[in-house]
Amino acid sequence: RPPNVARGPSVAMLAWPARLALLALVQVAESSQETFRVASPRFSHVGDATTSSAHSKKVRRSFLRRFNGKDAFARSKSIAIIPQPKNMEVLGGDDLVFHSGALRLSVPSTVESDAFYEHVIGKTNLKVDAQVDLPQIILEVQRGPQNPQPEKYTFLVSSENEVRITGSTSHGLFNGLMTLRQLFVQGDAGEWRLPQVKIRDEPEHEWRGLMLDVSRHFFNASEVKHLLRTMASFKMNRFHWHLSDDQGWRIPSQKYPKLTEVGAWREGTQIGHNRSIHDHVRYGGSYTADEMRSIVAYAKSLHIEIIPEIDSPGHIQAALAAYPE
């Protein structure tokens, strides 16, 4: 076989579990029906699409007739946040409704403002306005003398036409924004609503991550950023980026350009467990230096730390194909 054809475990066999896990995560995050709120028939969610089937609308109308905002326990059963907050109290009462499709916004800095516009406003048709009679969303950072939990936040939707999200740091406030994104629901008339809740939340585990193997199956920069956004929606904070293996080298190098010119491509992918059977389809790809800088910067804006994996001294068939000497 050609010298740069990948050896090692079956690419087809190993790629599918990772791809299926990724697809499952993305489907949950951007389903066309009731995104995130899989346990709730009440409204379609704030995901990329907010349409629902006729059956779903019928179920929601039945739900609204049965629970009109007075039964807090019943309401709590319809509120699904992933991951589940450490403490959530459903206050009862009517939803905070954004009748005019607009809101007032108070933010501590342009960083939080940019995050709000990208992750909340960008997923709804809501507008930001300065009218005093509009519902107000207040974002604030309260740093104490000691800060043992940088991702902690509190979240309050009150009967006073106000939403207040307070983070112990910018990261904590960002986590509160992701909760806001999940809680926003759209009613049958197109109005956006929030249930009256009080949340105190912080992560149970410091490391909450996902690994993407782009060596065996390449994902371009746009797809990686899509995955990072999905991770952020679920408050994940570590991205294990598997960038090299026998099946392909994805990292640019000015000193060793053949690593991507040769090592990033294979002339066939092994099918099943038989190393002599390949599909003979040229496959590969790599990132430019600018793309990698852009991905790292974007992950930082989402409060996600990237953990790169570059294999050596084993699992370097792609590198040896580029520089056999």
Image (cartoon, grey):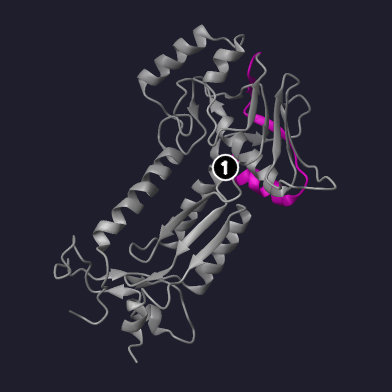
Q: Amino acid at mark 1?
A: Gly
In the rendered image, residue 126, in percent from the top left (x then y), is placed at 61, 34
SS assignment at label 1: helix
Give the vertical position of 202 relative to 320 (above or below): above
Along the viewing direction, whichever of 262 and 211 lies nearer the viewer: 211
Write down the region rendered in magenta: 93-122
Give the vertical position of 173 relative to 228 (above or below): above
Determine the residue positioned at 31% across, 82% down.
321
Determine the residue positioned at 59% across, 10% down.
71
Q: Quadrant of residue 304?
A: bottom right
The residue wearing badge 1 is: 122
User: Viewed as shown, does residue 141 lie left or right of 189?
Assistant: right
User: Viewed as shown, does residue 249 lie left or right of 63?
Assistant: left
Give the vertical position of 143 relative to 293 (above or below): above
In the rendered image, residue 92, in percent from the top left (x then y), is placed at 65, 14
Q: Quadrant of the C terminus?
A: bottom left
Along the viewing direction, whichever of 45 and 260 lies nearer the viewer: 260
Most extreme residue toward the right is 145
Q: Is residue 95 magenta?
A: yes
Determine the residue positioned at 46% across, 71% down.
310
In the rendered image, residue 23, in percent from the top left (x then y), is placed at 37, 46
